[in-house]
Every structure is written in C-alpha cells, then in structure tokens.
Image: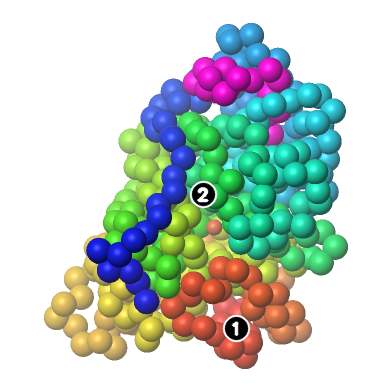
Amino acid sequence: MALSVFELRKFVVPEFIFGVGAIDLAGQYAENFGAKKVLIVTDPGIIKSGWLEPVVKSLDNHSLPYVVFQDVHSNPRDYEVMAGASVYLANGCNVLVAVGGGSPIDCAKGIGIVAANNCQIADFEGVDRVTRAIPPLICIPTTAGSSADVSQFTIIADSMRKTKMAIVSKTLVPDVALIDPGTLITMPAYLTACTGMDALCHAIEAFVSQACSPLTDLHALKAVELLSKYLPLSVSYPENLEYRSYTMLGSLSAGMAFSNAILGAVHALAHSLGGMFDLPHGECNAILLKHVMAYNFSACRDAYEKIGEAMGLSLKDLPASQREMLILSTIDSFREQLGITKTLGDIGITETDISRLAINASVDPCLATNPRVPTLKELEEIFRHAL
Ligand SMILES: [Fe+2]
C-alpha cells in the first residue's frame, strides 16, 4: 500500500550538478574529496567517443594522478569488478570516477564495495548487506537511462550462475553526480532509444511500486511526461541540446523515483534475461514493458491511467476497458516509434528457455515491490507473451 502524504518516509539522492559543462568539474570534486590518486572506470566505447578526455584534462588541471580501468562489458561481470578492485588497491587509489553508461558506473560501485570490504562481490547480493562505506565516488553519466549515477543500486552479472545480482544499499549512492547532457550527443539512435525506454520503465515501475510515496510519485510522473515528449525528439535530432537536456532531466527524475520506490516485474524479468543471455538491459525492458503492464493492470488501474494522461492521452470519456487498451497500445507504439521492434523470439529466446528465466526472475529483489505478486506460472506466461 502506498504511503499517504503525512507518513514518515526516507528519500535519498546524491549531490548532483546538472547542465552542459558539468563533466569539467571532475577534478574540482576529486580534489574536494581529498583525492591522492583516482581510479577512472570507463569502457572502450566511451574512450572512442571522446568523453574520457575532458575528465582527464580536469584531473590534470588539479594536478591529480589517475589510473584508467576500461575492461568493462555492458552487463558488467563479477570478475571485472574484482579485477578493477585489484587495480584500485595496487595503485593506492582513494577516489573513484565513473564515466559512461550504467555499466561502468555499476562496475565502479562494485569496485568500491570490494576495495572497502575486502570480500568477493557476490557476498553483498541483496538489500542492505554492504557494511563498510565505499570510497568517494564521482559519477559522470553518458546515457540518459540507467540513473546508476543517482541510485542506491548496482547490478552485477554473476558469471558462474549466469544471472544478475542486485545489490541495494544506501552506501552505493554516489557522492556527486556530474550530469552533463552534452555527453549524450554522441549516442547512436538505437542506444538512445533503449536507454530512454529503461528510464521510462524506471518511472512507470516506481509509480506503481508497493514502496512508492508522494515524493517518489512527483518525480515518476514528471519523468513520464518529459520522456514521452523528448525521447522521440532526441532519437530524431541527436545533436539538439535542448531535447537531450530534457531527456536527461526525465531520466534523472525517473532515477530519483526508482532509487527510493524500487522497481517491479519488468526489471526482475529483464535482469533474468540479461544475466542468462547477456542482452542489452534497455532493450529487454522495452520488449517486456507492455506485457508486464497488461499483467499488472487490474492491480493499479488508476496509477496506469495517470501515466497514460502524463503521456498525453485523453481518457476521461472512455469506458475502463477502452482506457486499458489505449494505454497498452500507446506504450507499444511509443516503443515502435523509437525503432525498437523486436520480440524476445527475434533476439533468440525460445520456449525451452522460459522455465529457467522465470525461476531466476522469481528471486530478483525487484519483484518484491511489483503491484501484483506473480506465481512462477504467471512469470512464464509474461515471458511467453513477449516471445
Ligand atoms: Fe533499469
């Protein structure tokens, strides 16, 4: 049951700087945090796009030495976290700077956990299991989607179990996020679409979460409004800074909402898919969203109608069944309009995978806040609809 407006609630967000040029403040913040040596966590794609350069320049301007760790896949693996922690400790680093999408940021959080707690990353899976605070962490997101730069989550792939571990802890909230919409202009259209759909899923799942509150609702609904208007424009006009900035603002709002309200079945199922088949997180979410909403609809009809209205639908004169159909078809056409047209079958998932996918999804912590509690059979059915 959602909290009413007079009940106690906690809302955790980091300090953040939002705006073009925020990336140039990396050196200033590292100095403020007492940096002696910085570990920069990034990936080869970001280096190729040119976004490591301003970070390095900013550190140089403050005479701060650094080491670059770039061995990070999308869906960062447990062994990459352990390797990064070894580099951090071997070089005597004391501050982390993550530059990139959700993968380098999640990896940097994992490196921080391992470096501070001297354990295997898998030891921290679950909620509130990180005991010792991670080193100062500066996050510079280069996608408008994951919101790992403001969240208390990290998602790490368990390479042995072929599943994803969700680690949720207040200690994972970064010390500062330098959110620079200028970094988005190099993002290709399909990546813009998938990461933006991830953000939309964050907003929708937070708004109907069993842990939502009036504070998270404010941000979630605003995020739906901003993303539904500006994400398609960002895909069509990649170099327009105004469209990119509003998309980034939508992603930030969704991030503040979901980090505090947690998520739901879309993410539980997407984590299962991503862990088993190493698929892009945003693409999985985009494919699953409508099917999870169809399953959840009876449990959160009013909230979904508010989401439909935030997307610009006029629902008030329609009967309930038509409102439901219109909202679901709008979600579907929004995804298609962004160029995401695949089904799970198209990306290689078959009927024989469904049982294992559903079992892995059933133990994901994100499922606990979904508005309906699905059985294993129901999880299988949702996957089957998305094939
Ligand atoms: Fe996500």
Q: Residue at x 57, y 17 (%)?
A: 31
Placement of 148 over or under 128, stated as above or below? above
Quarter of the image where one finds residue 113: top right
Q: Which residues are magenta?
A: 25-41
| In front: label 2 or label 1 | 2
Quarter of the image where one finds residue 47: top right
Placement of 162 over or under 39, stated as above or below? below
181 part of magenta stretch: no
Q: Is residue 330 visible?
A: no
Give percent across and percent down for residue 129.
66, 57
- Dot 2: element: loop
Q: Residue at x 33, y 54 (%)?
A: 219
Residue reaching furthest to the left: 317
- State the residue position of label 1: 379
Position of the C terminus, as image quadrant, is bottom right
Q: Earlier in the sequence, mark 2 or mark 1?
A: 2
Give percent across and percent down for residue 138.
57, 32
Give percent across and percent down for residue 171.
58, 46
Q: Is residue 99 left or right of residue 225?
A: right
Amino acid type indicated by mark 2: Ser
Q: Is residue 29 visible?
A: yes
Marker disc for residue 151: 2
Q: Residue at x 49, y 72 (%)?
A: 369
Residue reaching furthest to the bottom: 377
Q: Is residue 163 left or right of residue 185?
A: right
Quarter of the image where one finds residue 301: bottom left
Amino acid type indicated by mark 1: Leu
34 part of magenta stretch: yes
Mark 2 within 8 Å of ligand 1, using the beta carbon: no
Mark 1 within 8 Å of ligand 1, using the beta carbon: no
For mark 2, does the 10 Å Cα neighbourhood hold few (<14), some (14 to 19), or many (20 or more) residues?
many
